[in-house]
Amino acid sequence: MRRGTYARTFAPDPQAPPTRLCDSAGCTAAGEYRAPKSRDKLREYWWFCLEHVRQYNAAWDYYKGMSPAEIEAHLRSDACWQLPTWPLGSLGNVHARFDRLREQARAFASSQPSEPGPVKQSAPPDLREPLSTLGLHWPTTLAEVKARYKELAKRHHPDANGGDRTAEERLKSINLAYARLRTRLAGMPQGDSRR
């Protein structure tokens, strides 16, 4: 097992200027160890000798002067790295998430082997992808395609999903699939797609 090289706990700071004196009043030792000036100035430092940095650290209280409510709020914001958070479902697209889960469940269920039955006619190769996008099976009719398109367009419209970019991309693929199926099925006599 290879051992890593770790700096010692009280090793002098490599960024310390070589001739700086300790910032403690009356001390003439070299100020090799840095300590933050305050809670609000964590990137500004005092430079102390080893003895005085130990005293400073022992007396340091980050939460000094804060009320219990302020301490609690600070701890909560630290739990999420000071990033904003919202309650679950408050962004307006909770229904879109459930719809996506339902679609994934349907897709999973349809991909599972079912009981043996009559063999269905396979779809033409150029219609397999659009049928899959709309969640339809071959054979189908233009009326079924239109009904399914309306349902999916309503569900994935960006206005219904709070401007969700994934819903917008999904709607684009639904539109392309619908256009391809509509063009192909409109040219067939009504009974042809059911054979």
Image (spheres, grey):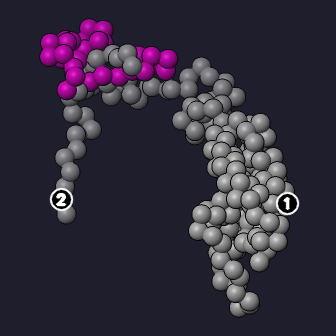
- Number of numbered discs on residues: 2
Q: Quadrant of residue 41?
A: top left
- In the figure, 69 relative to 145: above or below? above
Q: Position of residue 134 (x, y in %)?
A: 71, 59
Residue 133 seen from this side: no
The residue pinned by badge 1 equals: 143
Judge whether residue 17 is colored magenta: yes
Density class for disc 2 (Cα within 10 Å; few <14, some 14-19, many ≥20) is: few
Q: Position of residue 172 (x, y in %)?
A: 65, 45
Residue 13 vertical placement versus 19 (above, below): below
Q: Which mark is residue 32?
A: none
Magenta region: which residues?
14-42
Of residues 195 and 47, which is closer to you in this image? 195
Image position, residue 165 (x, y; %): 63, 40
Q: Amino acid at mark 2?
A: Arg
| Disc 2 to disc 1, C-alpha distance | 69 Å
In front of the other: 24 or 166: 166
> Circle 2 — which element?
loop
Between 71 and 147, the one lying in front of the other is 147
Residue at 33% of width from left, 16% of height from top?
46
Q: Quadrant of residue 20?
A: top left
The earlier-in-sequence mark between 2 and 1 is: 2
Indicate yes or no whether the magenta region holds residue 147.
no
Name of the residue lying farthest toward the top: 26
Q: Position of residue 170 (x, y in %)?
A: 66, 48
Instruction: Name which residue lies at 63% across and 32% down.
Output: 84
Q: Looking at the rendering, in which quadrant would you find the N terminus?
A: bottom left
Identify the residue position indicated by label 2 in the image: 2
Q: Amino acid at mark 1?
A: Ala
152 to the left or right of 28 = right
The front one of 101 and 68 is 101
